[in-house]
Amino acid sequence: MNAKWYAVYTKPRWEKKVAELLSLKNIESYCPLNKVVRQWSDRKKMVLMPLFTSYVFVHLPEKQLGELSKVNGVLNLVYWLGRPAVIKDEEIDTIKRFLNEHQNVQVEKAEFNVHDSVKINRGTLIDREGTIIAIKNNSVKVALPSLGYILHAELDKDSLVKAVKK
């Protein structure tokens, strides 16, 4: 069958409803739900909120992607480089395991990724280029090749910009 995971973009606040509608059409889907404590004036309650706003993951063969347009609440597939973005099985498994072990999970968009080429735009290493080898909290460890050596410097994310490929 050769099914792969894809991400679909949904109407705002329709993630759980879209997952339900997909299952009614026998399309395997996954809407990661985060356990969050919400405070009301008179009580606290644990609620399940979608981890990724306006996204649901679907598992089906590429030739069946057209079926998704018939599902109410699905706006579009998520595309990467002009093709439907394929999400690795390991990444879906990691999300599932992480949500099973933790609650009140926060998601933030990654500005930089490990192995990105960057240019330093402030400090004593200004205009040097390097490669990100680790990301921790609000700092990034960058390998700066110089004179045949690699210098490791922990830099604040604010002092980096993505390097332009030549």
Image (cartoon, rainbow, N blue to C red):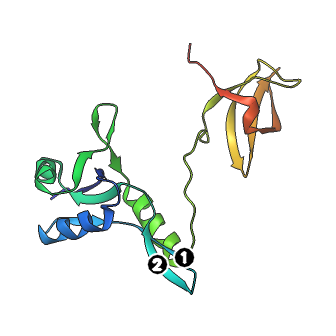
Q: Nearer the viewer, residue 102 or 18?
A: 18
Q: Is residue 159 above or below residue 110?
A: above
Q: Which residue is found at the position 16% from the left and 53% from the top?
A: 68
**Label 2: which secondary element:** strand
Q: Answer yes or no: do the residues labelled 2 and 1 have beta carbons within 8 Å?
A: yes
Structural crowding at the residue carrying mark 2, measured as other residues with C-alpha within 10 Å and reported as few (<14), some (14–19) or many (≥20): few
Mark 2 vs mark 1: give the one in front.
1
Q: How many marks?
A: 2
Question: Is 25 on the left-hand or right-hand side of 143?
Answer: left
Residue occupying image coordinates x 14% and y 49%: 69
> Residue at image x 36%, y 52%?
87
Residue type at mark 2? Val
Q: Where residue 104 sits: x, y (%)?
A: 57, 71
The residue singled out by tag 1 in the image is 38
The residue closer to the viewer here, 105 or 142, is 105
Q: Is residue 112 above or below residue 117?
A: below
When the figure is inspected, residue 165 is found, relative to residue 56, above or below; the finding is above
Q: On the image, numbered disc 2 is attached to which residue?
A: 47
Q: Residue at x 57, y 44 (%)?
A: 110
Where's the N terminus, which quadrant? bottom left
Dividing the picture into quadrants, the one containing residue 48 is bottom left
For badge 1, the amino acid type reads Arg
Q: Nearer the viewer, residue 142 or 66?
A: 66
> Measured along the vertical axis of the image, is residue 20 above or below residue 77?
below
Pinpoint residue 136: horizontal percent, then vertical percent: 72, 51
